[in-house]
Amino acid sequence: MTAPLPEAIKTALEAGQKAGLAATGGKNADYIPFLASVPSNLFGIAVVTADGRVFKTGDADYQFAIESISKVFTLALVIDQIGPNALREKVGADPTGLPFNSVMALELHGGKPLSPLVNAGAIATASLVPGKDAEACWAAILDCQSRFAGRKIALSNDVNTSEQTTNFHNRAIAWLLYSSGSCYSDPMRAVDVYTRQCSTLVSAADLATMGATLANGGVNPVTGERVIGDDKTAPILAEMTMEGLYTASGDWAFTVGLPGKSGVGGGILAVVPGELAIASFSPPLDPAGNSVRGMAAVTAVAKSLGRNLYRPRS
Ligand code: GLN
């Protein structure tokens, strides 16, 4: 397999820009008040290759709230510590088929979240981060996000305050998890840590670097640092395939064929194992909570590069 040439990536970014601009509609998330205030017309795309080359276009350096994309990296931290089998047993490895904040999904499965990439499973995963208190867990998560990104990632106090003062639904989920034995720390500590992990600021270029670290078997291709064990990336990418875009994950696998992850801040990330990652940022979301423009852009970039996991390549 030959790595894509710079010209091919530049052409793909142009195709992504064009497809993204043509995709209209959607609406900023507003259940977290801060997110409603982010300018809706911001739009950027970035590609980072598994050999550390960075390509970007538009607002690819604008920093926005990572939101649910953080779930992937806390999952990475926990899988690296306790191993994929323990994670699968304690949290799960199946799609829920229901929205990301669904309480019904928990009720239907005896209180087991099934996926670490829905809110319930991400809160359960946050409860598995080793550390004597919330501050220690939070420090480990922030350090993990930073090592994936190859720079010091920081919390946005504005985003965090906006979430911590409105996250009542997630707190209810945490108590339900606790009642069924699927929350492995104090539930309010788990929600606090989870809420903070969603409130850090990243750019599309950061996300693409974080994804390229997964594409590169756990070594950040820009800094050269090994972030997680090389046997840990496959189960993470499998979880992304099953639940990364929530109820649209099946459509995404069918049409794009790459593990992906979205966040209600407008970010979206897709990974081509062994090769590269594609990230986009644009705030307006569809009803499932996925960036309308971002999905169109990433789809077009992947198509232009001819990358789809399910299609044989020579
Ligand atoms: N912090 C958000 C929440 O808990 C993240 C959701 C998302 O990005 N889908 O609702």
Image (cartoon, grey):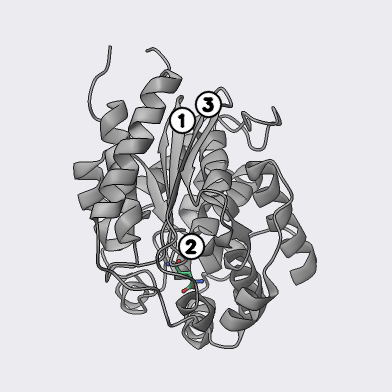
Indicate which label's residue lies in the foreground, 3 or 2.
Answer: 3
Mark 3 Cα-neighbour bin, 10 Å: few <14, some 14–19, many ≥20: many
Left or right: 265 as drawn, with respect to 8: right
Quadrant in which residue 243 is drawn: bottom left
What residue is shown at x 41% (from left), y 68% (from top)? 40
Q: Which x, y percent locates residue 133?
A: 78, 70
What residue is shown at x 29% (from left), y 53% (from top)? 21
Q: Are marks 3 and 1 in contact (CB under 8 Å)?
A: yes
Residue 68: which disc? Answer: 2
State whether residue 202 is above or below residue 83.
below
Tag 3 residue: 50
State whether residue 167 is above or below residue 133.
below
- Type of amino acid at the residue the image marks with label 2: Ser
Quadrant in which residue 308 is drawn: top left
Q: Which x, y percent locates residue 179?
A: 51, 81
Residue 308, visible in the rendered structure: no
Q: In which quarter of the image is the C terminus?
A: top left
* Element at label 2: helix
Question: What distance separates the C-alpha of mark 1 from that of mark 2?
Answer: 21 Å
> Which one is earlier in the sequence, the residue at label 1 or at label 2?
2
State whether residue 5 is above or below residue 249.
above
Q: Which x, y percent locates residue 126?
A: 60, 64
Quadrant in which residue 51 is drawn: top right
Tag 1 residue: 276
Left or right: 141 as drawn, with respect to 261: right
